Amino acid sequence: MWCPLTQPGGPAVCRQWGRLVPARLVAVVLLMTAVAVLQLGAVLLMVDRRPSPSRPLAVRPPPVRRPASTAERRRRAAPLLHLHLAQVMRDLHGSTDMELVRAGRLPRPASCPERAVIPWAGGRAGNMLFEYLTAWAVALRHDVPFLVPDVMIETFEGVFAGMTAQRGDLDLLLMDCAHLWHGRRNISVATIQDVWEDLAPITGWLELVGFPTNMTRPIYRLWHAHEAQMRAELRFSAPISSIVHEYLRRVRRALGPDDEPVTFIGVHVRRTDYYQATYNLDGVWMNMPGAAYFERAVRHYQRRYPNTVFVVVSDDMQWCREQLAALDAVILFPGDAGNPPMLDLALLGHCNHTIITFGTFALSAAIMTGGDVVVPKDLGITWNSYERQKDFWPAQWTEISVL
Ligand SMILES: *[C@@H]1O[C@H](CO)[C@@H](O)[C@H](O)[C@H]1NC(C)=O
Ligand SMILES: *[C@@H]1O[C@H](CO)[C@@H](O)[C@H](O)[C@H]1NC(C)=O
Ligand SMILES: *[C@@H]1O[C@H](CO)[C@@H](O)[C@H](O)[C@H]1NC(C)=O
């Protein structure tokens, strides 16, 4: 039965309905509409939240962080421009005395070994590292004890934590083991092409003699063939690496929270003794790597890596500050010529890549670092194997002209 809502009168039931229906109907319709709206809203919200490949989840776009310009990064790094490693060492260990941060001592052999390899400790830290590594490899390959003389003990003991050498100090050689020491044979390291394979079986004591001037490629090959073992052998002791880590941490913090990780490039600038020594040997002055060489090397790395920081180590820091500080790059000078060499080596060794001039100190650091290496060419010297041997450097390294 149809009861018109708007008309009063009609059947009794309709009159009754007439009073009730509009209110009920309106209430029911309103309720249903509200439910429908809520359901539609919920469905729409769910649709909105469903991840879709073309539409990122976050409603707000992430903040755009542009890499800081070199000028801005230079400004941030300015307070650290001349922060010395020695200062960091004092902050951490309350002293700048290297003796105090050495950790551990090399053992002495229990008795005189029948067979042994002993390096000839010529030159300073860099040469000694090459000599050490050559003797280490020969001793390991032939499974004979490896004894190092006093001057190597003084240089390396407690600096590297994992050395497998034993003390071959003069007391031991001249008193306890004199007959074996006096009966030793020797071989010149310069004649070794392949440190791992070259030698005949070892009987008695063998001394490896001579400067390791053209050992770069053999040591580089050795490093890549036995990298894990060599890294373990030359692992810097905890107190020494803590100084370098703290220095690098301060640099990273000063540069601020850019998304790109910092790429550290160790720069070794050798200037004083090598120039004169080369003249003495060659009778001509070499072409020294100058500001132009370093600028090209810096650009080389800036093109390849973001967020570069160049950390300079040198025997002539004043020249470096005068010539390199103005380059359009973040360049730091963490010391003076008087830095403990092993601390400088640890710093270079903890960087990611290297720029070097020459000499076994820098070559050791470059090899240990394991990254890219920039080396100079057109030095104009002939006494050394640099220009005589066309492939003096490992082929992977980048040569940049000093002219
Ligand atoms: C190497 O041994 C030879 C004898 O076999 C000796 O004449 C020479 O002086 C030794 N060289 C060094 C640097 O000890
Ligand atoms: C190093 O130089 C010496 C002398 O010139 C040469 O006999 C030797 O083969 C060279 N060694 C290497 C690894 O190139
Ligand atoms: C670069 O060197 C720093 C400092 O030693 C190190 O923390 C970082 O992992 C290195 N980066 C790469 C890519 O090896």
Image (cartoon, rainbow, N blue to C red):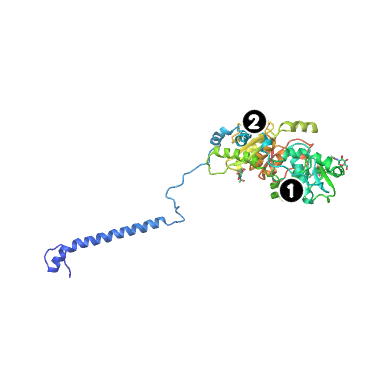
- Disc 2 element: helix
**Quadrant of the rendered image containing residue 75:** top right
**Disc 1 residue type?**
Leu
Kindly indicate the quadrant of the structure image that contains residue 320: top right
Where does residue 309 sit, x and y in percent of width and height? 60, 38
Q: Is residue 390 visible?
A: no
- Quadrant (top left, top right, bottom left, bottom right) of the N terminus: bottom left
Which residue in the structure is indicated by mark 2?
Answer: 323
Q: Earlier in the sequence, mark 2 or mark 1?
A: 1
- Residue density around tag 2, few if under 14, some if 14–19, many if 20 or more, within 10 Å: some
Tag on residue 222?
Answer: 1
Q: Which is nearer the eye, 238 or 344?
A: 238
| Residue 62 against residue 277 in the figure, above or below | below
Q: Amino acid at mark 2?
A: Gln
* Residue nearer the viewer, 268 or 174: 174
What is the CA distance from the residue labelled 2 to the residue labelled 1? 36 Å
Q: Which mark is residue 361?
A: none
Rendered residue at 32%/58% (across/down): 38
Taking 28 as reference, is 223 left or right?
right
Whether residue 103 sits left or right of residue 385 in the image: it is: left
Q: Is label 1 within 8 A of ligand 2 (CB to nearest ligand atom)?
A: no
Residue 2 position, x and y percent, is 17, 68
**Ligand 2 lies in which image quarter?**
top right
Residue drawn 65% across the image and 42% down it: 238
Whole-percent x, y for residue 11 in the image: 12, 69
Q: Image quarter for residue 25?
A: bottom left
